[in-house]
Image: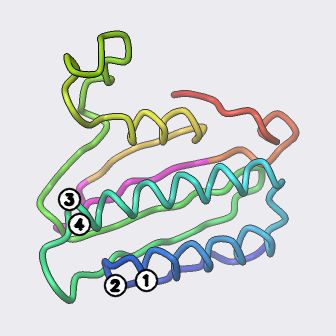
Amino acid sequence: MADAETVTVPATTAGIQTALDALDAFSHRVHAPDPVRRRMLTVLDEVLSNVVRHGTVGPGSSIVVTATPGVDDVSVDVADASAPFDPLSLPPPDTTSPLDARRAGGLGIALVRALADQVRYERRDDWNHLTMIWRTTPDGDGEAHAD
């Protein structure tokens, strides 16, 4: 089994692309099924974009992404040193009201929950950690599973 891979990137658009490229290469090394790989990359793009837009503490901020293969899954941990923020504590977005009556935001974390098999948040050592897990066994080969 391959080892975990960690990449530290600047909290910038270029940093997002560097992390996505690293995760793509990692997913090929661990033979993640293509549907799982695509879901992982979509989720990572969304999570990193939100950290860059809303969470970073200024120029020079970085984001640490760690991908870890398991026996029948892959986990990706995204860590940032922004103010404590648990996106999983937010209520689900209202998708039934007319657009002009809806509160902005919340669709990104709904997407993350829909495309990952498990999602969890932890504040550890003054860092936010959002961890997503995808099954790579036949029952996790392409169908998204909500928490």
Q: Quadrant of residue 14?
A: bottom left
Quarter of the image with the N terminus in it: bottom right
- 94 in magenta: no
> Cβ–Cβ below 8 Å for labels 2 and 1?
yes
* Mark number, residue 14: 1
Task: Give the structural element (helix, strand or loop) at label 1.
Answer: helix
Label 2 vs label 3: CA separation? 14 Å
Amino acid type for the residue under numbered disc 4: Trp
Disc 4 target residue: 127
Q: Could you tell me residue 98's position as x and y percent? A: 30, 13
Mark 1 surroundings: few (<14), some (14-19) or many (≥20) residues within 10 A: few
Label 2 with label 3: CB-CB less than 8 Å: no
Residue neighbourhood size for the residue with mark 2, other residues' Cα within 10 Å, grouped as few (<14), some (14–19), many (≥20): some
Q: Position of residue 110 (x, y in %)?
A: 42, 33
Label 1 vs 3, first from the N-terminus: 1
Tell me how far mark 2 sits from mark 1, CA to CA: 8 Å
Circle 4: element type: strand
Which one is in front, 101 or 135? 101
How far is disc 1 from disc 4 in space, using C-alphas? 22 Å
Q: Of label 4 and label 2, which has the lower sequence position?
A: 2
**Mark whose residue sits in front, 2 or 1:** 1
Which residue bears the numbered disc 3?
A: 54
Q: Is residue 98 above or below residue 134?
A: above
In percent of the image, x 51 and y 50: which residue is there?
132
* Image: 139 above or below 44: above
The residue carrying mark 2 is: 10
